[in-house]
Image (cartoon, rainbow, N blue to C red):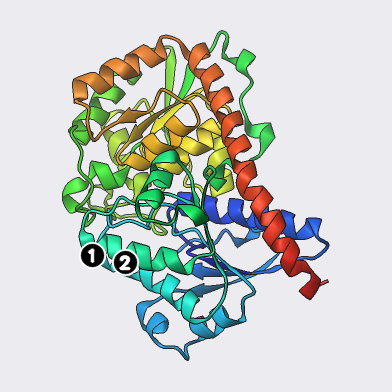
Amino acid sequence: MGLLWHTVFNENLGVGALTIANATLLVRAAERHGYRPVLHLMGSHGAFDYGHEMPGEHDFMNVQLKALLNPFSRLNRLLRQCDIVFDIGGGDSFSDIYFGKRYWLIILSKIAVGAARTPLVFSPQTIGPFHTPMARRLAVAALKIARKVFARDEVSLAVLEGLGVAEKSALTCDVAFALPYHQQAARHESDGEGRPLKFGLNVSALLYRTGRSPHSNVRLTVDYPALIHSLLERLTGDPQIDVHLVSHVISGKDAPDPAVGHFEDDYAVAHQLKSLYPQVQVAPKFASPVEAKSYIASLDVFSGSRMHATIAAISSDTPVIPLGYSRKFNGLFESIGYSYNIDLTCETNEAVLARFDAALTDVPTMRAEAKAASAEARRRLGEYEAYLDEVIGKLAPRHV
């Protein structure tokens, strides 16, 4: 089986979470039919390696433009050898919200699968937005190649309907809700009595260092650095709150000077903030998505702007205040009935702080809603799991 835009080398642990969780669901489906699949990961190669968390036998191939355009490349030969390809699009890259080259790679990779005559399935992901007519036309061309398309929220499903592919589309949820974690690291709710509240805050370097970011289509109505400073002043000023800065995109190398480190490195920004707020704790530089989720699961409350860090929280029943920078946050959290998401693309700093303060006044209610939302997410994910069982069941006779 081919797993397109999956990787165990990416510094963005959210992409890694999608890879490990989706692979886990695929392997479980195959095992129900009596065989162990070989998973061929195809995506981007970074400085990390958390392949030890992958279930079953797997290998990896880097996806590059030159290889996609060469029909005789190893990449295209591999696509022809696969029985089926599951494409997760990095979770949210099937959109022109990011820079142009990334979108072209996403589109061309799907065209390459079509040229290989290998069945293509869009695993659960955000669909759109598409800001230009050209981006929409490319999206439609790519979607026509797929046999099945899974949207992880209602907004994405509506986009698919608007693009004319409703008949092959289905609604489910983000596969990261199935990412395992170490239960022994998780907090016990009764432990909160008589000790400070363990509050985790993820600060997105992409947003904090927005002046250095090439992701020009990200538009906020808040002053993100000022908002983070205001939150930290509030949190560190309360002796009953123990603040942990939690990174979810981490550079493979330590920056000599955090102030000028890689623009996407949350860990460098966390150390930069610690120099301003020395009483905060900086969470470890996680080596894998499972390690990150296990740490987040040990906290009492979490907030952040990396979506899969917030999913790590809510899927471990940790109350969370997402600070979203794109509609993928709204689509996901609204679809599972969670009301504490804050949209940084339409709120002011003052409004965000007011909503944040209100949420912290009633943590038990937030926790109860998080548990209910997590249960709804797993129910929705069952739609995707049922399809995997069906389609992989048809492949099984070739391999048993």
Q: Residue at x 35, y 12 (%)?
A: 358
Image position of 318 with respect to 383: above or below: above
Judge the density around disc 1: few (<14), some (14-19), many (≥20) Cα neighbours within 10 Å: few
Q: How many marks?
A: 2
Q: Are marks 2 and 1 in contact (CB under 8 Å)?
A: yes
Q: CA distance from mark 2 to mark 1?
A: 6 Å
Of 113 and 187, which appears nearest the observer? 113
- Residue 180 visible in image: no
Tag shown at residue 324: none
Quadrant occupied by the C terminus: bottom right
Q: Residue at x 20, y 43 (%)?
A: 219
- Asked if residue 163 lies left or right of residue 222, the reply is right
Of 168 and 335, which appears nearest the observer? 168
Q: Position of residue 253 (x, y in %)?
A: 39, 59
Image position of 164 with respect to 144: above or below: above
In the rendered structure, which amino acid carries the disc numbered 1?
Met
Quarter residue 143 falls in: bottom left
Residue identified by numbered label 2: 138
Q: Residue at x 43, y 46 (%)?
A: 157
Residue occupying the far bottom of the picture: 72
In the rendered structure, which amino acid carries the disc numbered 2?
Leu
Kindly state the secondary structure of the residue where label 1 is placed: helix
Kindly state the secondary structure of the residue where label 2 is placed: helix
- Residue 319 visible in image: yes
Residue identified by numbered label 1: 134
Of 96 and 211, which appears nearest the observer? 96
Judge the density around disc 2: few (<14), some (14-19), many (≥20) Cα neighbours within 10 Å: some
Q: Residue at x 25, y 61 (%)?
A: 99
Q: Position of residue 263 (x, y in %)?
A: 27, 53
